[in-house]
C-alpha cells in the first residue's frame, strides 16, 4: 500500500467515527527496513517514524536527521534501564514505559537533562506472560506513580494478542485512558489500524503495510 493510500484510509476511518480528520498521527515503523526504503518515505515528505531498538535507531537516525528537517522518531520496543539515557537523547517519544524501575530511572535522567520525551505507558491488555506492559488491573496505580514522578505521560499503548479481535483490546485501552484523564492512544498496526482509529487511536504504528515485509534474514 502506498503512504498516500494509508493516509486516505486513516482519514476515512476518522470521518466514519465522527472524529476530526487529521486527529490520528501515522507512525511509519521503519525497524529492520533497508535505508533506501526509509529514505523513499522521507522523500515523500513523511517525518514521523517508529523504531523498536535503541541501538538500531542510533545507527540510522542521526544521519537522516541531518539530511531531513523535522524528523521525529518514537521508540516502540522494550527499553532496558541501562539504555534509558541514550533513549532520552534519541527519541521524541517513548511508547513502552512498563515498570516502576524504568519510570524512576527516566524521572531521574529527565531531571538531570532538563527535558523528557513524551511518554506512553504500555498496557498488556491480553495479559500475555511473554509480553511487556503493566496488567490492566495495575494500570491506574502505575499512571499515578508516574505522575508522582513528574513524568510527562501522554497516553497508553497496547499490542493486542495475535489471535484475538483487536477491537476488544483497543476498547479496553481507551477505557483505561479515559478514566485516567489521558488523551493519547497508541494502538493499531498494519492489519488493524482502521479499527484502532474507529476506537480513538491518536497514534497508529504501521510498518509492513508501508515498507513491505521485514526481512530478518
Ligand atoms: C513492528 C511493530 C509495529 C508495526 O507492525 P506492522 O505489522 O509491520 O505494521 C507496530 N508496533 C510495534 C510495537 C511493533 O513492534
Image: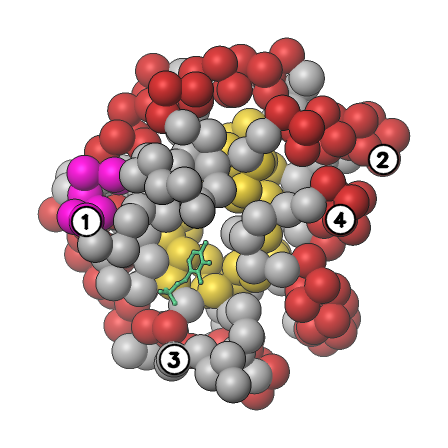
- The image position of residue 104, as x and y in percent, is 71, 25
Q: Could you tell me how far apart the alpha carbons at marks 1 and 4 are, in whole angstroms?
A: 32 Å
Quarter-wise, where is residue 193 in the image? bottom left
Mark 1 lies on residue:
164
What residue do we see at 58% from left, 30% from top? 99
Q: Earlier in the sequence, mark 1 or mark 4?
A: 4
- Judged from the image, the secondary structure of the residue bearing numbered disc 3 is loop
Query: Splitting the image into 4 quarters, where does residue 61 fall?
Result: bottom right
**Camera-nearest label, 2 or 1:** 1
Secondary element under disc 2, as helix, strand or loop, is: helix
Q: Give the extent of the magenta segment.
A: 164-170
Q: Could you tell me how far apart the alpha carbons at marks 3 and 4 are, in whole angstroms?
A: 28 Å
Position of residue 214 relative to residue 207, above or below, is below
Residue at the image point whose x is 43% and y is 22% from the top: 139
Give the residue at x 46% y 64%.
Answer: 28
**1 vs 3, front mark:** 1
Name which of mark 1 and mark 3 comes first in the sequence. 1
Residue occupying image coordinates x 80% and y 26%: 108
Nearest the eye: 216 or 170: 216
Crowdedness of circle 3 by 10 Å Cα count: few (<14), some, many (20+)? few
The image position of residue 72, as x and y in percent, is: 61, 56
Furthest-right residue in this view? 112
Disc 1 element? loop
Name the residue that disc number 4 marks.
83
Q: Measure the alpha-carbon separation of dots 2 and 1.
A: 41 Å
Residue 213 marker:
3
Q: Which residue is mark 2?
A: 113
Amino acid at each position: 500500500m502506498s503512504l498516500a493510500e494509508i493516509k486516505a484510509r486513516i482519514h476515512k476511518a476518522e470521518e466514519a467515527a465522527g472524529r476530526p480528520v487529521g486527529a490520528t498521527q501515522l507512525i511509519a515503523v521503519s525497524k529492520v527496513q533497508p535505508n533506501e526504503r526509509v529514505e523513499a518515505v522521507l522523500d515523500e515528505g513523511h517525518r514521523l517514524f517508529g523504531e523498536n531498538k535503541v541501538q538500531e535507531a542510533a545507527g540510522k537516525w542521526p544521519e537522516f536527521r541531518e539530511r531531513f528537517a523535522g524528523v521525529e522518531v518514537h521508540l516502540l520496543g522494550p527499553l532496558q534501564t541501562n539504555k534509558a539515557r541514550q533513549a532520552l537523547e534519541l527519541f521524541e517519544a517513548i511508547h513502552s514505559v512498563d515498570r516502576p524501575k524504568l519510570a524512576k530511572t527516566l524521572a531521574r535522567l529527565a531531571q538531570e537533562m532538563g527535558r523528557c520525551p513524551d511518554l506512553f505507558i504500555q498496557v498488556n491488555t491480553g495479559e500475555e506472560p511473554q509480553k511487556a506492559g503493566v496488567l490492566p488491573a495495575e494500570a491506574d496505580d502505575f499512571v499515578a506513580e508516574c505522575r508522582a514522578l513528574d513524568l510527562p505521560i501522554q497516553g497508553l499503548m497496547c499490542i493486542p494478542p495475535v489471535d484475538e479481535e483487536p477491537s476488544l483490546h483497543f476498547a479496553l485501552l481507551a477505557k483505561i485512558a479515559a478514566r485516567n484523564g489521558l488523551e493519547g492512544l497508541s494502538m493499531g498496526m498494519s492489519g488493524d489500524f482502521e479499527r484502532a482509529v474507529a476506537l480513538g487511536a491518536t497514534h497508529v504504528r504501521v510498518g509492513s503495510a508501508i515498507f513491505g515485509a521485514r526481512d530478518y534474514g
